[in-house]
Amino acid sequence: MKQGIHPDYREVVFHDMSNDFKFVTRSTVNTRETIEFEGKTYPLVKLETSSESHPFYTGTQKIIDTAGRVEKFRSKYGSRTPATKAAE
């Protein structure tokens, strides 16, 4: 690798603000804040959602009934007559 052209790849703490979950991983993200975590000082990135709080991963995701939506649309707009063709 060429020297001096790559971003600094280091350990960073990601903090999920919705449930106070913190984890350490490596990243090149630039941050101004630091945090003391498990006896070491790391750069800090604050998140709104992570795998610990996202509905898909926690199992609280709601399933949407798309077939019901289609039937509702057809019952509301299906009885209308199609547009007439332009006179030739």
Image (cartoon, rainbow, N blue to C red):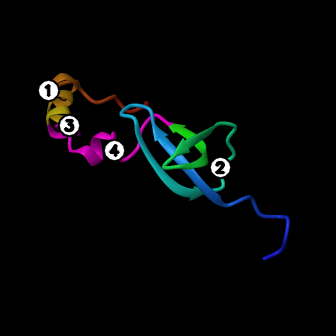
Above or below, 68 relative to 29: above
Q: Are dots 4 and 3 in contact, CB under 8 Å?
A: no
The answer to whether 35 appears left or right of 76 in the picture is: right
CA gap between label 2 and label 1 equals 51 Å
The answer to whether 85 appears left or right of 14 in the picture is: left
What span is in magenta?
47-67
The residue type indicated by label 2 comes to: Val
Pointer 3 residue: 62
Pointer 1 residue: 75
Pointer 4 residue: 52
The answer to whether 11 appears left or right of 55 in the picture is: right
- Judged by depth in the image, the label closer to the viewer, 4 or 3, is 4
Q: Tag 2 or tag 4, which sits nearer the N-term?
A: 2
CA gap between label 2 and label 3 equals 33 Å
Q: Tag 3 or tag 4, which sits nearer the N-term?
A: 4
The residue type indicated by label 4 comes to: Glu
Above or below, 1 relative to 73: below
Q: Residues within 10 Å of mark 1 (few under 14, many from 20)?
A: few
Residue at 50% from the left image edge and 53% from the top image edge:
24
- Judged by depth in the image, the label closer to the viewer, 3 or 1, is 3
